[in-house]
Image (cartoon, rainbow, N blue to C red):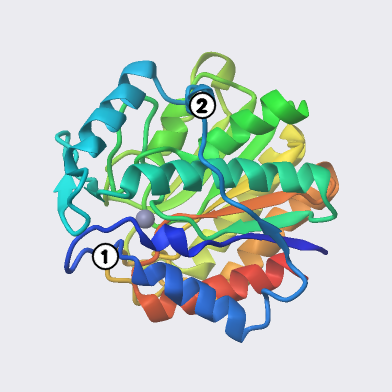
Amino acid sequence: MALALLLDPLFKNHLTGQGHPEQPARYDAVTRALETAHLMENAVRVVPRPALDDELALVHTAPYIRFVRTELSALAGRPDAVGELSTGDVAFSEQTLDVALQAAGGVLSAVDALFRTEARTAFCAVRPPGHHATPGRGMGFCLFNNVALAARHAQRKHGVDRVLIIDWDVHHGNGTQDTFYSDGSVMFFSTHQHPWYPGTGMSGENGEGKGKGRILNSPLPAGSGGGEILAAFRERLLPAANAFRPALVIVSAGFDSRMGDPLGRFQLTDADFATMTGIAMEIAQRHAQGRVLSVLEGGYSLEGLSAGVTAHVRALHS
Ligand SMILES: [Zn+2]
């Protein structure tokens, strides 16, 4: 199956400060791993481009978009300085706004590639991550919700009706859940450590109104691994997805759920990431002509990130 890749060294230009786990070296770890595993050869290359304000507005509120532009312009002319959003929890540098816009826009171009090229699967090695960004607030290292924007873009531009988002990051994708909580056209499935940051994602949070039953949370205790997480994929995700029949499958691909991550206490192995990828592809092959869009979220051990991404992208390419 042809694979598309969104890669660009500009994703290293978002600086977060000494010792911050969401560091530019993550990008190099991912690309070196893909290169070593020969996964870049023959891939369709997606070129990043900035997301437009009307695209950001598919998910984010106008006041929030203005807030981000204003706050992130504070470091103009200070290329080495690092600041933090006044609402906390998101470090940024002079280039961060440009990088975040290129990440979001690049992910939208990757969606286009799935519908306009021979590629049926895509992996986007973007920074900053996105799944904690709600319509009106950046948090948890995230500014714009890349996967939520991708779902809306597929609906608007490619006539896709139903989209499934699978989030296997160790942290709950609260921003994605908030975006689609009462929507109904986007199903959100998440396995995550609980209790843990950001504190949301209890199993009773299952959507409201048209979204009732379309939000599927599997909170699991620290120490959980392939046994518990793959069971949730097989017993909860598969039947729900087969009833929902998504026309596009999106993965919030966080690798902080891998064993040994400094920001998580899950025990997933590289083989587990391949298995979860296979389940996403099985759903997509049955309902979505094989279309799977994967977007990098967390993963803070550089070695673990390299190994997890390799297993995931190799499976996407199979
Ligand atoms: Zn995470």
Amino acid residing under circle 1: Pro
Q: Residue at x 51, y 19 (%)?
A: 182
SS at circle 2 = helix
Where residue 142 sits in the image (x, y, percent)? 34, 44
Residue at horizontal 26%, vertical 48%?
A: 94
* Residue found at x 76% / y 47%: 114
Asked if one can make out residue 51 in the rendered structure from this viewpoint, the answer is yes
**Where on the picture, by quarter, is residue 131?**
top left
Image-based side of 134 in relation to 190, left or right: left
How far, Cα to Cα, is label 1 from label 2?
28 Å
Could you say where residue 176 lies in the image, as x and y percent from the top left?
46, 36
Instruction: Name the kind of residue labelled 2 in the image.
Output: Phe
Residue 190 falls left or right of residue 153? left
Residue 228, position as x, y percentages in the image: 50, 62
Along the viewing direction, whichever of 302 and 118 lies nearer the viewer: 118
Query: Which of the 4 image quadrants contains residue 14?
Result: bottom left
Label 1 crowd (10 A; few <14 / some 14-19 / many >=20): some
Which corner quadrant holds the C terminus? bottom right
Q: Which residue is mark 2?
A: 180
Q: Which mark is residue 21?
A: 1
N-terminal-most mark, 1 or 2: 1
Q: Residue furthest bottom?
A: 36
Name the front one of labels 1 and 2.
1
Q: Nearer the viewer, residue 144 or 184?
A: 144
Mark 1 touches mark 2? (CB < 8 Å): no
- Ligand 1 closer than 8 Å to label 2 CB: no
Residue density around tag 2, few if under 14, some if 14–19, many if 20 or more, within 10 Å? many
For mark 1, give the secondary structure: loop
Residue 144: horizontal and vertical position, in percent? 41, 38
* Residue displayed at 51% across by 80% down: 32
